[in-house]
Image: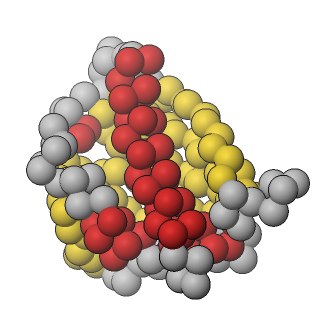
Amino acid sequence: MGVFTYESEVITAIPPAKMFKACIVDGDTLIPKIVPQAFKTVEYIEGNGEPGSIKKVTFGEGSQFNYMKEKVEALDKDKLVYRYSVIEGDALMNKLEKITYETKLEASPGGGSICKTSSKYYTIGDFEITEEGIKAGKEKALQIFKAVEAYLLANPDQY
């Protein structure tokens, strides 16, 4: 088993607390509403969103995958940090034990925020993650992030 880590940053004009609430805290309901081609449904199998909770995400029509199960590892609403692991589903392609993501939102100088994400891919056997595979996942995540940003800019009274 190998562990491959990938880090990324995205800057947005949305303040960190507002983006965290929309994207993370309320993301399970907001994202299927504004980006249904990404996530069709999100349902909790165990818990209600706090650490230890497990949720099933059913992907939208445009996805190559059907579903994934995520385990919430950490949720710190004060420090604006969220960590979860994809623990099951065809998104793991039978080649990954799990993928762990940590997202942290920090204030940027202009009043917006910087979204820092760390992704850890835990591979099975000799499988190696390609830059191409990481890039595809990053682009999908960025599309969702930008859709939430656009929603918040168009609806400034929300959140």
Question: Which percent across, then down, holds residue 29?
Answer: 34, 76
Assign the N terminus to one quadrant of the image: top left
Residue 130 against residue 102 in the figure, above or below: above
In the image: residue 115, left or right of residue 111:
left
Q: Quadrant of residue 103?
A: bottom right
Residue at 42% in and 70% down:
27
Extreme-front residue of the structure? 154
> Vertically, is 11 above or below 81?
above
Identified at 15% across, 38% down, the residue is: 64
For the rendered model, the colour scheme is secondary structure
Residue 41, x across and y down, in percent: 20, 68
Location of residue 99 in the rendering, given as x and y in whole percent from the top left corner = 40, 42
Residue 55 shows in the view: no
User: Residue at horizontal 56%, vertical 66%?
Assistant: 153
In the displayed structure, does residue 104 sit left or right of residue 42? right
14 or 16, nearer to the observer: 14
Q: In the visual, does 58 lie left or right of 144?
A: left
